[in-house]
Amino acid sequence: MTLYSSNDPAAVCLEVGQKRMFACALAWPGWCRSGKTEEQALETLAAYAERYAVVARQAGISFAVEHRNPFQIVERRTGSAGYTDYGVPGAIAAGDRLPWLPEEAERSLALLAAAWMVFDRVAATVSAELKKGPRGGGRDRDQLIDHVLGAETAYARKLGVTRRQPSHDDTADIAALRASILAALRTPDAGAERKETDWPPRYAVRRIAWHILDHAWEMEDRNTPPSSLSGQ
């Protein structure tokens, strides 16, 4: 089933902050972009459809890219200065607390695993030193990889999983961290006792996938010279 086409708009949760808002496609973990206005956030989300299609293709899931009336806002959530305005989609949608059907869960986890594959492919291809911003800022490749791994180590704790942060060159440890995250998402009621502050699986998978792809696309855009690498 194609969930993104001109005849079947993608369901979007709009997270509204004071200075920024996020538009997140609920059925497509990681396809989430921001803007200063609702219109800008939705336009940016649409503009990234081609890039997200690489993830869907990696997962073996049909994703039709159409730009006529592509979105249906099904929920609006109030964001915060600490998350939304800072540049992080931090609002848990009401729909995120619904139970997962096994088929839906496996589909979402396939997209998360595909996002990791895309990230690894980009990281293996871009230059170690990335282009700096106008003021000389911005992490280089290995710093970005370490940043993503550090975030995922923290995210795992939100799923009841405690592991140390892997080194960016320890492929076995990285694979083990990712496997533990997938296992916790696949069986959220197993293992460690869940806390009130733990993330529901639906939110966790789209937050983790967003962070992975946000930095994969950043590496592509800041590569020297810039090129599109994730689809190779």
Image (tube, helix red, strand yellow):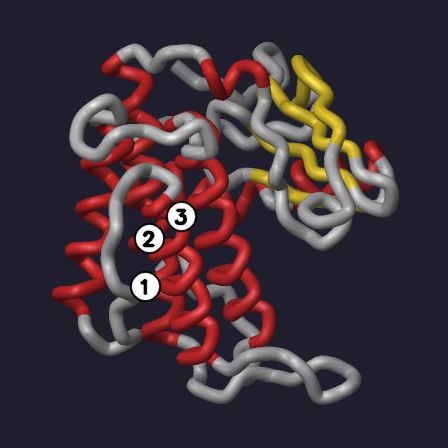
Q: Which mark is residue 155?
A: 3
Crowd around label 2: few <14 · some 14–19 · many ≥20 (10 Å): some
What distance separates the C-alpha of mark 2 from that of mark 1?
A: 6 Å
What distance separates the C-alpha of mark 3 from that of mark 2?
A: 15 Å
Q: Foreground residue, 39 or 170?
A: 170
Callout 2–callout 1 Cβ contact below 8 Å: yes
Q: Foreground residue, 198 or 215?
A: 198
Q: Quadrant of the C terminus?
A: bottom left
Tell me the residue at 45%/78% (across/down): 143
Crowd around label 1: few <14 · some 14–19 · many ≥20 (10 Å): some
SS under mark 1: helix
Query: Whole-percent x and y of residue 26?
Result: 53, 25
Query: Whole-percent x and y of residue 59?
Result: 29, 38
Crowd around label 3: few <14 · some 14–19 · many ≥20 (10 Å): many
Residue type marked 2: Trp
Q: Earlier in the sequence, mark 1 or mark 3?
A: 1
Residue type marked 1: Asp
Tag 2 residue: 116
Tag 1 residue: 120
Query: Whole-percent x and y of residue 223?
Result: 53, 78
Q: Foreground mark, 3 or 2?
A: 3
SS under mark 3: helix
Using residue 21 as the reference point, say whether residue 187 is left or right of it.
left
Using residue 121 as the reference point, say whether residue 7 is left or right of it.
right
- Which quadrant of the figure has residue 24? top right
Tell me the residue at 65%/43% (across/down): 33
